[in-house]
Image: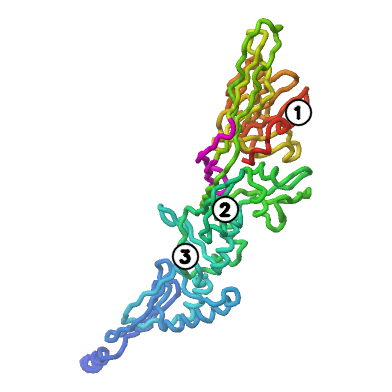
């Protein structure tokens, strides 16, 4: 009996639950708690409840595609960012702080009620450097696309640094004239006129929000970037007794004194500055992210070498004697070349025009033997075409010679500068492949650093014969021929016999 009464009571309670409990469960506007349900986000954020009838609009903030958290009030985020900007306002005035480019926000309507993490979101953005200063973006591109982007706080700083970099390759007067679209005329006197300058790459300007650590904030840092790009390696040289700017530059990719001065603005103030022993110089050649192309017109007077002497045998003269009937005279012509320089390095040169000034005269010599003499005439020619001097006698301590380049053909041929007999064709660890020619009367000439030698000892060569190729064997920083004279056994400056003043540097 008792068991029946207990069963009846249990059934009665269950009936009451069905009658009163289920309607309350589904009563409109009520929620069911979903405790401990968490979102898959970078910030630990719980789902507090679920509302089956009402959707709530949320903002979702992402970093690199991963959810940081749901935002309850976007204004709290923006207000927090605005307050954080006060820490940067002194260094980056008149701008704003915003979300970096790796952050993006989307919208979503949800039945879930999410835990409010707005303040934590702001702190997360700050702590992980995900906020950026609104600044200037400079995009470098070619026809192949964008290859680098830099950010600068002040565009005026960029323009100043850019002009400072360009002054490594042209004068301030030329840069000003080109900027003002002024006409630059071809040279009318011997020398070089800088005719044009252009940067091969395109530069596009825009704005972006980036980390303060990525922003260039001064001229010096932008200038260093324009010189070397992202390359942080530097090469330094400490001067010794007898060093000159020209000599130091010659050793390091033949930089000009001006370029060394521009790379060491706190140390070198003049291209003619006398160097103190122990001075440490930055001698890192440019690895610039931009390509500066300079066109120059160069007007020079070139010697037209006459043909080698015409020898006539005269049986009335004693054997070995000779009489000059017609004196040899060099011809002259004025030549205008157009040169192309890229980032300070000469790439090519083409003749634009020339004017004959004087015809060459071939000498006629009567000799008392049928053997063609192997003694030089003393009228010396340059050992290369389009000669330029990169390092003269004593341009650095211990340099006893004149380093001559072919401006437009770095590995061109080398000529015998006068008639003579090859005394030596050998190798030395400093001067590499070298040739010595004996011109008679105690006069010899020495040609060093050849990449190839085309003569052998005992061979008679005439003035203008090809004896080898320009090279950089032995100790050399670039292709050239090292030339010096040997007079009665003494090494002598070649410029005592050649008109070095008539040609400019390499």
Viewer-side residue, 491 vs 452 = 491
Task: Give the Cα separation between the discs numbered 2 and 1.
Answer: 43 Å
The question of residue 492 being in magenta is answered with no
158, 360: nearer the viewer: 360
Seen at 31% across and 80% down, the residue is: 109
Q: Which residue is mark 1?
A: 491
The magenta stretch is 336-358
On screen, 240 above or below 324? Answer: below
Percent position (x, y) of residue 296?
Answer: 55, 47
Residue underneath mark 3: 205
Q: Residue at x 38, y 76 (%)?
A: 60
Between tags 2 and 3, which lies in front?
3
State the scheme by which the image is colored.
Answer: rainbow
Mark 3 burial class by Cα count in 10 Å: few <14, some 14-19, many 20+: few
Question: For the residues carrying marks 2 and 1, which lies nearer the camera in this image?
Answer: 1
Farthest-out residue, top: 315
Whether residue 109 sits left or right of residue 358 in the image: it is left
Task: Give the quarter of the figure containing the N terminus.
Answer: bottom left
């Amino acid at each position: 009996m008792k068991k029946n009464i207990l069963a009846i009571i249990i059934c009665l309670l269950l009936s009451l639950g069905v009658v009163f409990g289920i309607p309350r469960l589904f009563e409109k506007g009520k929620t069911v708690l979903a405790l401990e349900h968490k979102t898959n986000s970078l910030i630990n954020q719980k789902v507090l409840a679920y509302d089956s009838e009402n959707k709530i609009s949320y903002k979702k903030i992402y970093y690199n595609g991963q959810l940081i958290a749901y935002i309850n009030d976007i204004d709290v985020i923006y207000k927090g960012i605005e307050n954080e900007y006060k820490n940067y306002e002194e260094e980056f005035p008149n701008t704003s702080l915003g979300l970096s480019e790796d952050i993006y926000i989307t919208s979503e309507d949800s039945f879930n009620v999410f835990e409010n993490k707005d303040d934590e979101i702001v702190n997360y953005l700050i702590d992980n450097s995900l906020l950026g200063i609104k600044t200037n973006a400079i995009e470098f591109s070619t026809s192949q696309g964008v290859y680098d982007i830099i950010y600068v706080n002040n565009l005026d700083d960029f323009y100043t640094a850019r002009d400072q970099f360009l002054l490594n390759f042209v004068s301030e007067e030329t840069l000003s004239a080109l900027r003002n679209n002024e006409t630059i005329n071809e040279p009318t006197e011997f020398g070089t006129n800088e005719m044009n300058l252009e940067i091969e790459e395109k530069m596009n300007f825009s704005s972006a929000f980036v980390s303060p650590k990525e922003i260039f904030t001064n001229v010096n840092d932008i200038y260093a970037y324009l010189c070397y790009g992202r390359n942080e390696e530097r090469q330094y040289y400490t001067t010794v007794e007898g060093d000159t700017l020209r000599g130091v530059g010659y050793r390091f990719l033949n930089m000009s004194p001006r370029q060394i001065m521009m790379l060491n603005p706190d140390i070198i103030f003049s291209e003619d500055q006398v160097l103190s022993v122990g001075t440490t110089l930055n001698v890192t050649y440019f690895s610039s992210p931009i390509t500066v192309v300079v066109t120059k017109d160069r007007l020079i007077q070139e010697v037209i070498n006459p043909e080698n002497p015409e020898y006539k045998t005269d049986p009335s003269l004693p054997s070995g004697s000779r009489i000059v009937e017609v004196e040899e005279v060099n011809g002259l012509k004025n030549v205008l070349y157009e040169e192309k320089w890229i980032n300070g390095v000469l790439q090519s040169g083409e003749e634009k025009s020339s004017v004959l000034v004087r015809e060459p005269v071939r000498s006629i010599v009567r000799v008392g033997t049928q053997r063609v003499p192997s003694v030089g005439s003393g009228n010396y020619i340059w050992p290369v075409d389009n000669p330029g001097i990169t390092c003269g006698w004593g341009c650095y301590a211990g340099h006893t010679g004149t380093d001559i380049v072919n401006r437009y053909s770095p590995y061109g041929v080398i000529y015998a500068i006068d008639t003579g007999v090859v005394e030596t064709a050998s190798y030395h660890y400093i001067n590499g492949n070298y040739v010595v020619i004996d011109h008679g009367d105690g006069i010899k000439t020495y040609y060093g650093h050849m990449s190839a030698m085309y003569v052998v000892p005992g061979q008679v060569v005439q003035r203008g014969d090809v004896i080898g190729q320009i090279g950089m064997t032995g100790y050399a920083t670039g292709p050239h021929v090292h030339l010096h004279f040997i007079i009665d056994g003494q090494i002598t400056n070649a410029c005592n016999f050649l008109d070095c003043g008539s040609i400019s540097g390499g």
